[in-house]
Image (tube, rainbow, N blue to C red):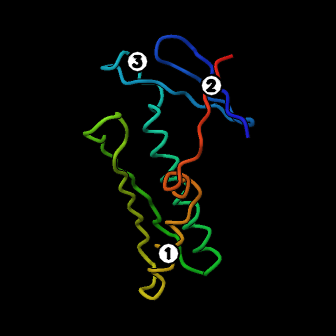
């Protein structure tokens, strides 16, 4: 898989993958135009979106009603160095999950690809061309 990030000027970038594009920017109080989410916001969206996908897929296969399914994600910046996100809190709101399926839904939510990647960090090679 290949992601390309093009610099648009100022604090704005365009991310492109497959046939999709999205804007990455900074809020106005950080020098941007606030035309898109920041990288940490996109990271939280990736985690919450991945959890949501895994939960929805499991529920669909298990015959559990997904009406009202929402996933929220909060994060805090760590107080120690290096500067990074220190804690993600992911909340899955699934109003009609049967009590006897709660543990299974929690297990599935904790097995999504993004969650697993954050729990077992990959090697990251940055190469300047």
- Residue 47's tag is none
Residue 50 in the image: above or below residue 7: below
Q: Which residue is mark 3?
A: 32
Crowding at dot 3, Cα within 10 Å, few <14 / some 14-19 / many 20+, comes out as some
Crowding at dot 2, Cα within 10 Å, few <14 / some 14-19 / many 20+, comes out as some
Q: Which residue is mark 2?
A: 5
Q: Locate residue 99 relative to residue 122 in the image: left or right.
A: left
Examine the image and state in which quarter residue 30 appears: top left
Tag in front: 3 or 2:
2
Secondary structure at badge 2 equals: strand
Measure the C-alpha gap from mark 3 to mark 2: 16 Å
Residue 33 in the image: above or below residue 125: above
Q: Which residue is mark 1?
A: 105
Secondary structure at badge 1 equals: helix
From the image, which quarter does the N terminus lie in? top right
Residue 19 pos. (x, y %): 74, 35
Pick whichever of labels 3 and 1 is earlier in the sequence: 3
Q: Residue at x 44, y 58 (%)?
A: 71
Q: Locate residue 56 relative to residue 100 in the image: left or right.
A: right
Secondary structure at badge 3 equals: loop
Residue 110 in the image: above or below residue 35: below
Pick whichever of labels 2 and 1 is earlier in the sequence: 2
Q: Residue at x 34, y 46 (%)?
A: 86
Pick whichever of labels 3 and 2 is earlier in the sequence: 2
């Amino acid at each position: 898989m290949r992601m390309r990030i093009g610099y648009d000027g100022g604090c704005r970038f365009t991310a492109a993958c497959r046939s999709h594009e999205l804007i990455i920017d900074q809020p106005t109080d950080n020098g941007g135009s606030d035309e898109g989410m920041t990288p940490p916001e996109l990271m939280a969206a990736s985690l919450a979106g991945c959890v949501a996908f895994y939960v929805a897929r499991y529920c669909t296969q298990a015959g559990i009603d997904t009406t009202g399914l929402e996933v929220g994600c909060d994060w805090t910046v760590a107080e120690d160095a290096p500067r990074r996100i220190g804690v993600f809190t992911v909340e899955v709101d699934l109003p009609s999950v049967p009590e006897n399926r709660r543990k299974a839904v929690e297990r599935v939510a904790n097995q999504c690809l993004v969650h697993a990647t954050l729990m077992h960090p990959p090697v990251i090679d940055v190469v300047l061309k």
